[in-house]
Every structure is written in structure tokens, then in C-alpha cells.
Amino acid sequence: MVKELITKIQKTNAPIVVGLDPMLSYIPAGLKEKAFAEFGETLEGAAEAVWQFNKAIVDAVYDLIPAVKPQIAMYEQFGIPGLIVFKRTVDYCKEKGLVVIGDIKRGDIGSTSEAYAVGHLGRVSVGSQSYYPFDEDFITVNPYFGSDGVNPFAKVCKEENKGLFLLVKTSNPSSGEFQDRLIDGRPLYEIVAQKVVEWGADCMDGDYSNIGAVVGATYPEMGKTLRKLMPKSFILVPGYGAQGGKAADLVHYFNADGLGAIVNSSRGIIAAYKQEVYQRFGEANFADASRQAVIDMREDIASALAGK
């Protein structure tokens, strides 16, 4: 699967993933009013507004990017109607030729991990039939349980040619409370990175592994170290833009071949119309603002990499 991701990155010249993390506050009033008129101010109405918002943004940007990353919590908050829209979004993005990274951050052991893996990456058996329930291409996984938690996900990845991004150094301010703690003189995130390499060695897809890592854009020096520790692991980089990560800080997340990383922007793109720089588009043209934000992000990253 990482081969397919690389092909799409090279085709678009955009190592970018758009985070489809819709909050009702991001959705223009007109879309919400239309959805509420049809379904009322209900969970169904909220889910319909999210679906129309997602669809408009995907239609506006799918030709510019290789991948999207829907964050499942933003859909779960609306219950079953929200989960239905999560699945509709996954399917629609795949129809548009996009790689889908399900940002689900699951992690458990034994049969529970197996069930998460089957539900999001693999096939579930129902009598004599089998089905792909959510069918993302990659998912994010919390490796806190160790090999017992990761191996069931890795097994499904090998069976289905799917991928994982394991949390190594996250972009949030308090991540250091655990992730930076020294174990035998080394930060915990480096030890997790070493395990990513070990798990990934058995899931190679060409030059890179289908098992990658999440490393936040807000910690560039740590990202530089982790790039060296995980040369064959793709790095999913959250934290660009709205969380303070800058393109100039991201160059060390990439390998010498110009590959190895994909940078996420969520509200910086999907809610771009709310930013002063894109206000000229207006609320009615929110999707056009998102498209311009993608173009600007692509140019920003390309410029930084050119000067690397």
C-alpha cells in the first residue's frame, strides 16, 4: 500500500494529506440550514451537513493531493449517523482515487486488536460471506500495548496489503509527559521508533514499509533524529499550520530521495475560508478556499524541500 501512496505523491508532487476533521463550527451556515431543514436539528441533520461539507471539499481538492485522513472522533460524536457518514466519506474518497488514512488511534490486545484491524483494514466473516466494514488503506494505531497490540494489526496489513502509522512522537504540547521520559538514558519515543523499525521489517512494500510512524511537526529536532532512526518508515506528520508547524521545519522528516513523509493539515485546509488570507472567497465558496490552501501548502513545502 505504501507503494501506491508514493506513486500518488509523485504524481501530484504533493506530500500532503488533508485531514477531514469536520466540526459543526467549520461548516458554513447555509449548508447547516439546508441539512437541518431536511432532517431537523438532529444527529441525522448534523451528519448530513458533515457529509455535504466533506463532499464539496473532496470535489475541490482531490486532483491536487494523494490522500485524506478522516478523524473518526469527529464522526463518532454524532453517533450512528456520524459513523455512516464516516463510511460514506471513506468510500467517496476512494472512488476519487485517494488513499484513505483512517485516524482512529486504536490499540488493545488479542481478539480486541484483531477486531479493530478487521473492522478498519480487513474483512469480517459473516457466515459464508465476508465484508470490508470501513475499508481504509491505512490507520493510526497506539503502540502502548507493545507487540501484543501491534501484531494483530500487522497481520491484517500483510494479508490485505494495508498499512499502519504508529504513534511515536505526537504534536500535542503535553506529549512529553510520557514520550520524552528517559529509559536507560534514551527518550521513550526513540525506543518506540526502534520497535517501529522491527515491526516494519516484516511488512516491506518496496523501499518502504507498510508500517510507518506519526511524528508531529511541532518537534522538528526530534523529527530529525527519528528520520535517521527509521529510514524505511514513512512518517505521517501532523501539526503543520494551525498547530504551529512550519514547512521549513519539515525538511528533515524527508529522506534524501524526497520521500518518506506526508504532511497533514486539517482545519488549515477544510476551514480555510475562515482565515483572513482566504476571506476573499467568502463563506459560499468555502471549497474554493480549501483548494487554494492546498495549492499554497504544496508550494510552501516544495519551496522548503528545494532549499534543503
Image: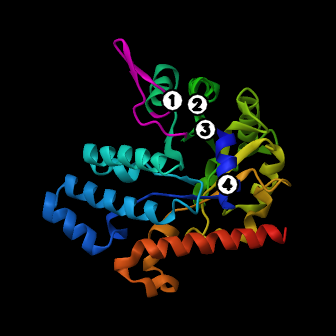
Q: Amino acid at mark 3?
A: Leu
Q: Main secondary structure of the magenta part?
A: loop
Q: Residue at x 47, y 20 (%)?
A: 111
Crowding at mark 2 (Cα within 10 Å: few <14, some 14-19, many 20+): few
Question: Circle 1 sits on which residue?
Answer: 108
Q: Residue at x 17, y 56 (%)?
A: 42
Mark 3–mark 4 distance (CA, rounded to whole Å): 17 Å
**First along the sequence among labels 1 and 3:** 1
Residue 264 coordinates in the image, percent (x, y): 59, 59
Question: Circle 4 sits on which residue?
Answer: 9
Query: Disc 2 on helix, strand or loop?
Result: helix
Residue 146 coordinates in the image, percent (x, y): 63, 29
Q: Are marks 2 and 3 in contact (CB under 8 Å)?
A: no
Residue 241 coordinates in the image, percent (x, y): 59, 70
Question: Circle 2 sits on which residue?
Answer: 145
Q: Magenta span covers which residues?
A: 120-137
Question: Circle 3 sits on which residue?
Answer: 164
Q: Residue at x 32, y 51 (%)?
A: 77
Query: Disc 3 on helix, strand or loop?
Result: strand
